[in-house]
């Protein structure tokens, strides 16, 4: 969606719509706490490693839209890691 949209649409997508997913995770977090700490640690490790790897990919991008898309994915990985900690 980021590559096909104009730059302004890609920025709106990254700034607003993807962050609503983080808000949705925050709303259902109390149900996820009942599952257990083991599942939370699994999601924490996956999200932090994924955020780090995507950040490394972000450093190699020359296309501005792809850079916005990759940085959005890295930021959402950190959001999920923060929620699960």
Image (cartoon, rainbow, N blue to C red):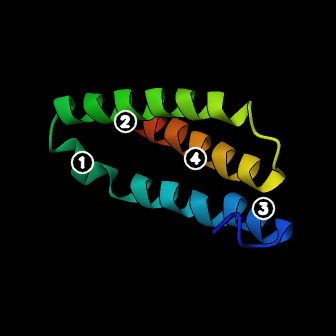
Q: CA distance from mark 3 to mark 4?
A: 13 Å
Query: Disc 4 or 2, which lies upstream in sequence?
Result: 4
What percent of the width, then of the height, locates residue 74? 59, 39
Image quarter hosting the C terminus: top left
Q: CA distance from mark 2 to mark 1?
A: 9 Å
Q: Residues within 10 Å of mark 4 (few under 14, many from 20)?
A: many
* Circles 3 and 4 in contact, beta carbons < 8 Å: no
Q: Residues within 10 Å of mark 1 (few under 14, many from 20)?
A: some
* Circles 4 and 2 in contact, beta carbons < 8 Å: no
User: Residue drawn 74% across and 30% down?
Assistant: 59
Q: Which residue is mark 1?
A: 32
What percent of the width, then of the height, locates residue 4? 71, 72
Query: Disc 2 or 1, which lies upstream in sequence?
Result: 1
Q: Nearer the viewer, residue 55 or 62?
A: 62
Q: Nearer the viewer, residue 30 or 70?
A: 70
Q: Nearer the viewer, residue 57 or 75?
A: 57
Q: Please determine whether, in this image, residue 14 is positioned above or below residue 74.
A: below
Q: Which residue is mark 4?
A: 73
As drawn, the label of residue 11 is: 3
Q: Residues within 10 Å of mark 3 (few under 14, many from 20)?
A: some
Q: Secondary structure at mark 3?
A: helix
């Amino acid at each position: 969606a980021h590559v096909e949209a104009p730059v302004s649409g890609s920025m709106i997508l990254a700034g607003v719509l993807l962050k609503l997913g983080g808000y949705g995770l925050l709303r259902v977090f109390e149900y996820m706490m009942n599952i257990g700490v083991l599942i939370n640690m699994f999601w924490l490790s996956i999200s932090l490693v994924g955020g780090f790897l995507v950040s490394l990919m972000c450093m190699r991008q020359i296309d501005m839209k792809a850079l916005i898309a990759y940085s959005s994915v890295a930021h959402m990985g950190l959001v999920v890691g923060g929620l699960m900690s």
